[in-house]
Image (spheres, helix red, strand yellow):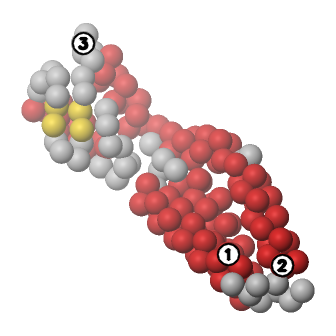
Amino acid sequence: MNVSIRHITLLIGILSVIVSFLFFDGGRKTYDLLLSSGFLIATVSYLIILLKKKLKNNIFWTLIVIDLFVTQRLPEPLLIRKSYSIFIIRNQSSLVKLNNLILTKSNGFLFIPTLDVDVSKDLTAAEKSVVLSMVNGTNISLI
């Protein structure tokens, strides 16, 4: 059995899916791009491999895909946890300031930075400005 470009692109697609989980929280756009493109590349490559109609080859690559799927599922929680850990380390000072602000609110609050919406109406204009300045660049989508 020869390893050709379709086999290599299948493996690259699957590797892209696995690597995408490192960007699960901190780089949501990167995560989405790597996950969807990796899945698309792997799927198309796998279908091209199946079109060769060599039964032995198809069974072999089906077993490889199943094995890689199981292998991908095993480190996924660890990679997601690592992604959050990296996010917290990078944004620790902003997160501590946000936490201190939240602790001053007796009822807590719900804030959606992308919409500039304070659902609980518990933030002053100055606090809103501080929250927005802290979350800029962190990809935080809900507080």
Lower position in the chain sequence, tag 2 or tag 1: 1
- Viewer-nearest of discs 3 and 2: 2
- Asked if residue 115 can be seen in this view, the reply is yes
Give above or below for 61 relative to 26: below
Q: Residues within 10 Å of mark 1 (few under 14, many from 20)?
A: many
Q: Quadrant of residue 94?
A: top left
Secondary structure beneath disc 1? helix
Secondary structure beneath disc 3? loop
Q: Is residue 105 left or right of residue 4?
A: left
The residue at the point 69 percent across, 84 percent down is 51
Residue 11: x and y in percent read 72, 73
Q: What residue did someone put label 1 on?
A: 46
- Viewer-nearest of discs 3 and 1: 1
Lower position in the chain sequence, tag 3 or tag 2: 2
Residue 27: x and y in percent read 46, 56
Q: Quadrant of residue 54?
A: bottom right
Residue 59: x and y in percent read 83, 71
The residue at the point 53 percent across, 55 percent down is 23
In three-dimensional space, the C-alpha distance between marks 2 and 1, rounded to whole angstroms, equals: 14 Å
The disc label shown at residue 107, or none:
3
Secondary structure beneath disc 2? helix
Q: What residue did someone put label 2 on?
A: 55
**Considering the image in quadrants, where does the N terminus appear?**
bottom right
Q: Residues within 10 Å of mark 2 (few under 14, many from 20)?
A: few
Residue 63: x and y in percent read 82, 64
Q: Are marks 3 and 1 in contact (CB under 8 Å)?
A: no
